[in-house]
Amino acid sequence: MPMMTDTAIRQDVRPGRREDAVACADILNGWIDDRDWMPRVHTADEVRDFYRDFVFEQRRVWVTGDPIHGFLAMDEDDDLVTALYVAKPGLGIGRGLLNVAKDGRDRLKLWTFVANRGARNFYTREGFREIRQTDGDNEEGLPDVLLRWERAGR
């Protein structure tokens, strides 16, 4: 699949529905399983249940593709991106989803793991800056970093 333009991705993005929860959870489960540094602290079924019962009930979710090949979840009250995962990185899908989340906002923030160099490089390219790091005070026990994006001129 060739690199997609932002316009093409935006045309394909739609609000997530509860019936999308399993597909989104499976993208996350695949991501976890593909990284040897990422501990599996919840079973794949627990992740699916969490997405169905919490993420798709309490977060704003956008998905792209049919079948779904990427999604972004957000806590809009805090301008916090809580999840951004794509089935095949490097095609512009993550950037397109992130741009949809940026629309109409002056700032976003998100957490990612220090070990996730690909994500950290991606977010830096997308204008995010590091605010702080932790020593792993999360359920995975991995150091993480809080990043923030602010619209230029704000």
Image (cartoon, rainbow, N blue to C red):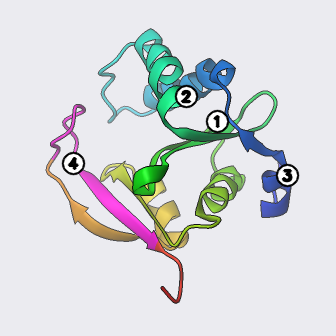
Q: Which residue has dot 2 on it?
A: 56
Where residue 28 appears, as percent x and y from the top left, is 51, 30
Where residue 44 appears, as percent x and y from the top left, is 45, 14
Q: Are marks 2 and 1 in contact (CB under 8 Å)?
A: no
Query: Gap in Å between the C-alphas at discs 4 and 2?
Result: 27 Å
> Range of the magenta residues?
136-149
> Mark 4 vs mark 3: which is more N-terminal?
3
- The dot on residue 87 is 1
Where residue 125 appears, as percent x and y from the top left, is 53, 71
Identified by mark 3, the residue type is: Gln
Identified by mark 1, the residue type is: Ala
Select label 4 or label 3 by which is in front.
3
Quadrant for residue 138, please give it.
Answer: top left
Quadrant for residue 103, please give it.
Answer: bottom right
Estimate how packed mark 1 is, as few (under 14), some (14 to 19) or many (20 or more) residues with alpha carbons within 10 Å.
some
Tag 2 secondary structure:
helix
Estimate how packed mark 2 is, as few (under 14), some (14 to 19) or many (20 or more) residues with alpha carbons within 10 Å.
some
> Mark 2 vs mark 1: which is more N-terminal?
2
> Mark 3 vs mark 2: which is more N-terminal?
3
Tag 3 secondary structure:
helix
Identified by mark 2, the residue type is: Phe
